[in-house]
Image (cartoon, helix red, strand yellow):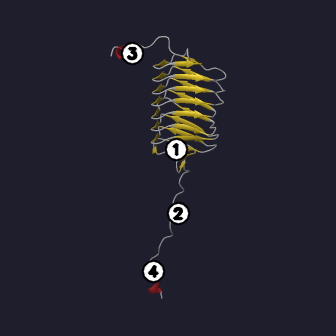
Amino acid sequence: MEEQCANFDLVPPPVPAPTPPPDQTDDGNCTGTLGNITVDNLDVPPGATCILNGTRVEGNIKVYRNASLYANSVRVDGNIQTDGAAARVNVSTGSFVGGSIQIFGSGAADILGVDIDGDLQFDDNTRYLNAADNTIGGNLQAFRNSGGVSVTGNTIDGNLQCKQNVPPPTGGNNIVKGSTEDQCADFRTKELPFQFLLLNQDTGSE
């Protein structure tokens, strides 16, 4: 009997896997902080706060009801959009957006020093909106906002359009290649850079 027992191999009990840290993304949802990683489309679900530091998003970012987005030095190949009364959208210096930034029917936004290939749009928002020192390939539009709008120091390839905002927007020193309209009619810089004047002169001579 002792000899038979001696032939059994003693198998050590399984070692439980370490508990992983809490996920900050779940099926494309951001509910915490993401660093220098690449993801597809990204959603900020209702009530959540998403912080992006150097993150690349190959699709779109959508920010839902009562959610907040803080994006620092990010690259977004698509759009950044609010969907149903987001609380806040902040996109800061060093960020690139290949599509548009669209803040519709939401709260506050701070868009600072961002390279935007498409449009920057603020429509029907209820808190303070700030657009400063951005490079915008399309239009900058602010329509029917009620928390205040500031538009300062942007370079805009398209038009700067502001309508039906109460209180009226404030701002200035924007380089606008298209038209400045309505409440933002006087927001164009008074002295255009020498390079911009040369570009217009070359275009007109063709």
Give the spatial CA distance, label 3 vs label 4: 89 Å
CA–CA distance in space, label 2 to label 4: 24 Å
Residue count near mark 3 (Cα–Cα under 10 Å), binned few <14, some 14–19, many ≥20:
few
Q: Nearer the viewer, mark 1 or mark 2?
A: 1
Residue 149, image x and y in percent?
61, 24
Q: For the residue carrying disc 4, how many other residues have a C-alpha within 10 Å: few (<14), some (14-19), or many (20+)?
A: few
Name of the residue lying farthest toward the top: 191
What's the amino acid at mark 3? Asn
Residue with the mark numbered 2: 16
Nearest to viewer (mark 2 / mark 4): 2
Quadrant for the C terminus in the image: top left
| Mark earlier in primary sequence (3, 2) | 2
In the image, 136 versus 203, the foreground residue is: 203
Q: Which residue is mark 4?
A: 8
The answer to which of marks 1 and 4 sits earlier in the sequence is 4
Mark 1 and mark 3: Cα distance apart in space = 40 Å
The residue under label 3 is 200
